[in-house]
Image (spheres, rainbow, N blue to C red):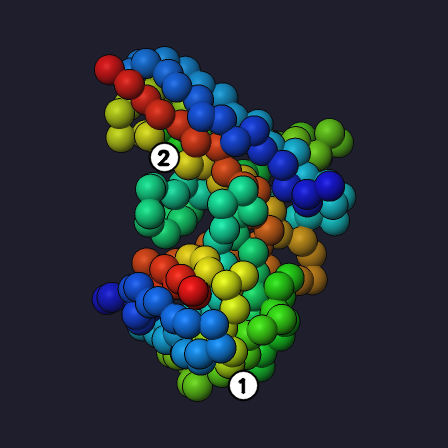
């Protein structure tokens, strides 16, 4: 099992460009999450999908959109990148049971110039 | 005020030392509590859940005080491999298991 995978690992964008961060999990998890991590801020939830077919906003959704393509895949799109979106982005997944553990992907380091 | 607050450190301790991290949370509706570990430039990984009665996993002991809204992590006999950032994490009732992270406490264990 690969667990949670993310592509790309690194990306540099210019202001105004768009891109999609891809995330996939092979653990048959129901819930998936997108976070960003900035120095001094901790991880902050951008969007989440409690189950296939549903998505909801997290703490910092502005400037982002998501798609839960199927049970395995959850993508994050930046329509018009801004320097404030320079960050490390983590995708996570969780099985909808009594255990609350989230499993994280390796992250995408995004720089917006 | 941040929902989860931690001392950022760094805590620099010699191998074999005992070190304790503290964390406070502001929302009394918080239901589940965790410590995650994050190595430099890596993803967070669950270290242990924190139960009301306190729990131990090898050299690691976690405590929860709901009345004071306080969580702690004790590491005994520190190893070089314990060097990492430790994230205090809480989850509230009815929030689809969304996690709220503290900014983390960095630990550096030295020879």
Q: From where the camera sits, is residue B30 visible?
A: yes
Q: Kindly identify the residue that appears in the image at 58 percent across and 73 percent down.
A: A63
Lateral position of residue A25 relative to residue B81, left or right: right
- Residue linked to disc 2: B84
A26 versus B17 height, above or below: below
- Could you tell me residue A28's position as x and y percent? 38, 73
**Which quadrant of the rendered structure holds the N terminus of chain B?**
top right
What numbered label is drawn on residue A53? 1
- Could you tell me residue B21's position as x and y percent? 52, 26
Residue A108: name its quadrant: bottom left
B96 versus B73 height, above or below: below
Q: CA distance from mark 1 to mark 2?
A: 37 Å
Q: Chain of mark 1?
A: A
Dot 2 lies on which element? strand
- Crowding at label 2, few (<14), some or many (≥20) Cα neighbours within 10 Å? some
Q: Kindly identify the residue that appears in the image at 33 percent across and 49 percent down.
A: B42
Q: Kindly identify the residue that appears in the image at 66 percent across and 48 percent down.
A: B31
Residue A4: name its quadrant: bottom left
Q: Kindly identify the residue that appears in the image at 56 percent across and 29 percent down.
A: B7
B110 versus A13 height, above or below: above
> In the image shown, does B57 or B84 lie closer to the viewer?
B84
> In the image shown, does A57 or B59 lie closer to the viewer?
A57
Lateral position of residue B81 relative to residue A63, left or right: left
- Could you tell me residue A78's position as x and y percent? 49, 76
What numbered label is drawn on residue B81? none
A45 versus B23 height, above or below: below
């Amino acid at each position: 099992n690969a667990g949670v995978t993310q592509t790309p690992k690194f990306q540099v964008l210019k202001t105004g460009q768009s891109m999609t961060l891809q995330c996939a999990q092979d653990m048959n998890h129901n819930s998936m999450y997108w976070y960003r991590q900035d120095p001094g801020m901790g991880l902050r939830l951008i969007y989440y999908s409690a189950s296939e077919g549903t998505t909801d906003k997290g703490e910092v959704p502005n400037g982002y959109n998501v798609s839960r393509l199927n049970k395995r895949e959850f993508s994050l799109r930046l329509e018009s990148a801004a320097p404030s979106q320079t960050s490390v982005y983590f995708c996570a997944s969780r099985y909808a049971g009594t255990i609350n553990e989230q499993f994280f992907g390796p992250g995408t380091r995004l720089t917006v110039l | 005020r941040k929902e989860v607050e931690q001392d950022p450190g760094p805590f620099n301790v010699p191998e074999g030392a005992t070190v304790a991290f503290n964390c406070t949370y502001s929302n009394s509706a918080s239901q589940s509590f965790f410590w995650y570990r994050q190595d430099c430039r890596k993803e967070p990984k669950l270290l242990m859940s924190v139960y009301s009665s306190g729990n131990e996993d090898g050299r690691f002991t976690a405590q929860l005080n709901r009345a004071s809204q306080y969580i702690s992590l004790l590491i005994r006999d520190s190893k070089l491999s314990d060097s990492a950032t430790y994230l205090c994490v809480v989850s509230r009732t009815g929030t689809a298991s969304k996690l709220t992270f503290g900014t983390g406490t960095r630990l550096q264990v030295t020879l």
